[in-house]
Amino acid sequence: MTRLATDPVASLPQAPSAQRGALGTLLRRPAAIVAIAYLAILVVVSVAAPLIAPADPLGLDLARVLSGPTQNNLLGTDSLGRDVLSRILYGGRRSLISVVEGVVVVLAIGVPLGLAAGYFRGWGDSVISRISDVLLAVPGIILVLVILAVVPRNEDVAMVAFAVLGAPSVFRVVRGATLRVREELYIAAARVSGLSHPRIVMRHVLPRITGPVVVQASLFAAYALLFETGIAYLGLAADPSTPTWGGMVGEASTVIQQQQWLVIPSGVTIAVTILAFGLLGDSLRDALAVDERIASSAARGGKRAPAPVVVENASEPASSREGALLDVRNMSVSVLSEDGVTPVVEGVSFDVMPGETVGLIGESGCGKSVTAYAILRLLPPELVLASGQVFLDGTDIAAASDRDFDRLRGRTLAYVSQEPQPSLDPTFTVGSQLSEVVRNHEGGTRREAKQRALELLELVELPGAQQVARARAHELSGGMAQRVAIAIALAGRPKLLIADEPTTALDVTIQAEILALLRRLKAETGLAMLLITHNWGVVADTCDRTVVMYAGQVVERADVQDLFDRPLHPYTRGLLESEPALAEPGALLTAMPGSVPAPGSWSSGCRFAARCPFAVAECSDGAVPLAPVGTGRQSRCLRVDEIFGAVTA
Amino acid sequence: MEPLLELRDVTVHYRRGRTTICALDAVSLDVRPGETVGLVGESGSGKSTIGRSVLGLAPVRSGEVLLAGRDITHLPFKQRRETYRHVQVVFQDPYSSLNPSRTIGGTLAEPLEAQGGYDRAAVRDRVREALERVRLPAEAADRYPRQFSGGQRQRIAIARALILSPQLIVFDEPTSALDLSVQAQILNLLQELQAERNLSYLFISHDLQVVRHVSDRVFVLYQGQVLETGAAAEVSEAPAHPYAHALLQAAPLPNPRLQRERRMARTPSIRLESSSSTDRCAFAHRCPYAIPVCEFERPELRPSEHGLVACHRYPEWCAEVAPDIPVRNGGPS
Amino acid sequence: MLRLLTQRVLLAIPLLFVVCAGTFLLIELLPGDAAQALAGQTSSDEQIQQLRESLGLDQPLLTRLWEWIDGALHGDLGLSQTYGLPVTEIMNSRLSVTLSLVVGTTLVAAVLGVALGIAGALHVGPVGRFVDGLSLAGLAFPSFFLGLLLVSWLAISIPVFPATGYVPFSTSPTEWFRSLVLPVVTLALPGVAVIAKQTRDSILETMTRPFVRTLRASGVTRRSILYKHVLRNASISVLTVVGLVFVGALGGTVIVESVFALPGLGGLAVEATLKNDVPIMQGVVLYFTVIVIIVNLLVDVAYAALDPRIRAS
């Protein structure tokens, strides 16, 4: 029936702005710019040393020995009267060549081996990894000294040896990065496109690991310089008359009692250069991390509007029921980012009666999880409660102090999350975590807490409670771990349980059991529940009342049977019609065109109007209130009567 | 009519360190031209492994995979590449199946470049066509994946699967990571494409309702074994295997009244977690209708009312279920 | 646990063998040999050959390797050309110096680093930035430069500590301590930096994991979460780094002992290199490898104690 419409071109954001990339981010950091500039200047100056050095680096002047900085010798002279500045300029050449040697060798070994080991795995990987581990068993510098004992004063050999011994760390990083890329589905897709393995490595793997490789190269350059100057300091490097930075520090150390200045020029030069390499590596690593974050957040949220969209939050009449256990009124939550303050939840109101299960349903990006976190005061730092009140048993807990709220945690208000095993600390047994929570609520001895913990495990229908208590999170299946999480939540005998997609990560047969458990607990203990989900079946199975959210707002509230029998909002109806379970097999589903608008791009009128088959000009004029429609129901739609027929009061 | 795709007693073993996991245990199935075959099962059922075996991405230990009668189980790379002109894939995770560093155009062109024989103009044309087919604007070719939503990315993945004009597409949980409304758009798109080009689909999903909606025939998998197969509508209304029955009962229907009625009739299942099974029925330890022989002998697939079923107690177990409660789906009243 | 230990110890033996044999092989493969290096540029071929014979270098590789291993198992690592004393005797007399230095460094680095890291994680603003800055500075200052600066300020300008030299613990504990302060500070600075950064990063990362949110939601106090749960989970990667710091410090003794004229194994290695004394170098490789293996073993044991998943595998 409904023809699939082409997504309007306007839905694609401008190309350049979202494509800044890691390089761009890098070049915005002052530290990185300074480091790059310094290194560039250093290279130029070293290459041009014969042209710009004020004096001959080997030129003795025994009359002017160990002078501090003077007009003739800007950085002073050493114990043979040679000009320090010139020696530093020349010394840079040897150091830079050594660094380049080191970096080239370490990459030449570490990158291909890391790629091969990470991509192909198998026995080759085991062998190379073992060798790599062996090489790490001895401090590299010792082996280089061994080599220098046999091939004396050969700095090139020393640098190559150092690089070979340093290759394991680059190998590890490259292997790790390759392993991660290899697991991505686009590698399998490339294979099914018909690309051979070598081509996949060149096209898909290599570009993705370039970032970490450059970071490692930069950091290794720092270490290589550290090593090279150290060797030179010890007098193990080249011909003693050739100026080297390390050698200069060495010479300075012999006269340190007489002249304390001499150590400074060469030492500081070394330190600053190493610092530059290190800064470059760190900045690049940070830039890559930021780039990854942008890529993954852009995927889900879309671009944020530059100016905060201030929507008139028409304070709606508090249509909450009497004696509600949880009463959320006009809650708004915003996200703080570089682009400003953007609302993600706006003016949300609903309530939960004692012993009732309310389903908060919506698709991704509608703000349902954020609403739950806001109630629980578990918002991540970049999200803030902008306005609204949350009444729990009559008290506004949103305005309560941290201390007062902490007293409610687990006792009146409990929480179960979406991911069963990650909700448990992997380093403790399940039983000890449960006991800890019990003791936190009720005090008592360890034995009492343990006893209560076992009772709780039995309450959630775990067979063999003793054994389960001794297990750890990774030893339990998803269903069992979720039962444990529920036990932890029930430890404080809460009145309200907020469950955030508690069965989404579980197999369907296990899901049925968990939902049955929750229903049983509700029947036996009078537990009220706020169940967040995207699954209509779950709502139908467990909830008494539903609250439908769309683009940060509540668009409909109704008792569950009423909602399913007769949805009174075009979005709710459209969503129900998208359900394959409710459709004729083989027929086209009634699919709503377009997609959910992201926070920051909400219109000031009805946010669903762009996709609504019944929208008229009026819908986009101004904010649409959540108005009563019939008994105990509300809908955020101007045209309810026209669309759905007159609604009996 | 000869089947387009056939699996005969395919067994796949994976090695994890020192242990070997049997992912598929002598599985047989077939897909005919123009039809959609659904593979449904929970985690560990082996359904994704079947997809990978067809694509040459899984180590098949024994058995054969036949494409249009030709054995493609173990092929050297050049010949395997050739089969990719006929079989393609759409994966589950739209965020992982597109290389974030390449443009959409580059990603779509890749199959063409890999197969060879297309000049630049031809590539450009086909890319544009592919985008059009999945209802995305041509400008999308110059953009990067990060600029698209999950649903749009999945369309791009579908476009990539279509670009070589294959006869069979393997869909590995194509809509599991998508919202309900987006899923509906994608399922509709798949249906239209199939009608336009007489494609065959191997549709893998854990969601029985989705599989029922899109499939002609269905295979129910558990722990690497096929437990039941038959026409989708029939298997979903009157399953011949206790596991298929349990799956159906477990998935809550979007109808509160009906759910209440179903709950009252639900048979309890034993909550023991899995263990491997080659010489017995894989479901025996959880089956409320099991008898001793189920633990010692693996049931063969034999004809059921509407397909095949691997159960020692068929059709006797059906009588033990409360007779009145229907297993049917309800529609909006 | 016991099984893990025995497993590691059994693996260590072949590892030791491989490293020592590898060193032998390495020396063999290098252009020239010990005799040539010892004799220098000026000696004639005959003199070099004579030297070679007297050192036993003319025998086949495997024979020499076997003899060396046989000797090592009996506590005899050969004779040092330059000192005229058994290698074992020279090494043992210097072992305690190096161990004092390296163990002291690792302890200081670990304690200070972890404390700074926790502080940096809890107070994200200025302390966090300080930790970042420190980690860069720690890397950038070469130990010889830092050591010389410290000597310059705290030993020469203001004579608080001795500039050079080592006093054994048995002679005078206070003097032993004083003689180690500057070297330990020099060697520990990069370690403090690295450990602080890792601790901070690890804590911040652990705080984002789901179980922290679950614990918080169930009412467990912030303090309890941090000190009981977060630190335990974060400590695994910190432990890895502490092990690396130890190994790094061991390598760093080569320079630091030279700067402060401490009679330890590192300084010995430098002297032996300058004098081309191969037997001592081989002895140093052996000792250092054994130390590193023991440290890695301790780290593995600590891992298993902290993370039960590792115990199981």
Image: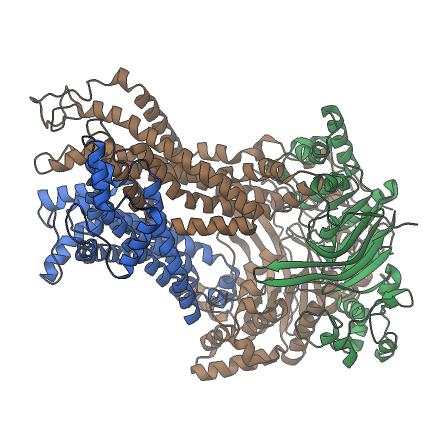
Chain colours: A brown, B green, C blue
Vertical position of residue A243 compared to residue C11: above or below:
above
C158 on left or right of A130: left
- Please name whichever residue, C154 or B55, is drawn nearer the observer in this view of the structure: B55
A122 on left or right of A261: right
**In this orientation, does residue A278 appear?**
no
C109 on left or right of A291: left
Vertical position of residue C159 compared to residue B297: above or below:
above
Total numbered labels placed on residues in the image: 0
- Name the quadrant containing residue A77: top left
- Please name whichever residue, B61 or A231, is drawn nearer the observer in this view of the structure: B61
- Please name whichever residue, B249 or A603, is drawn nearer the observer in this view of the structure: B249
- Name the quadrant containing residue C99: bottom left
B154 on left or right of A77: right
**In this orientation, does residue A450 appear?**
yes
Q: Position of residue A465 (x, y in %)?
A: 57, 80
The residue positioned farthest toward the top in the image shown: A51
Vertical position of residue A447 compared to residue A255: above or below:
below
Q: Position of residue C163 (x, y in %)?
A: 11, 46
Q: Quadrant of the C terminus of chain A?
A: bottom right
Q: Position of residue A538 (x, y in %)?
A: 72, 65
Q: Position of residue C199 (x, y in %)?
A: 38, 55
Vertical position of residue B102 compared to residue A82: above or below:
below
Report the residue at 50% width, 58% height from top.
C209
- Please name whichever residue, C147 or B308, is drawn nearer the observer in this view of the structure: B308
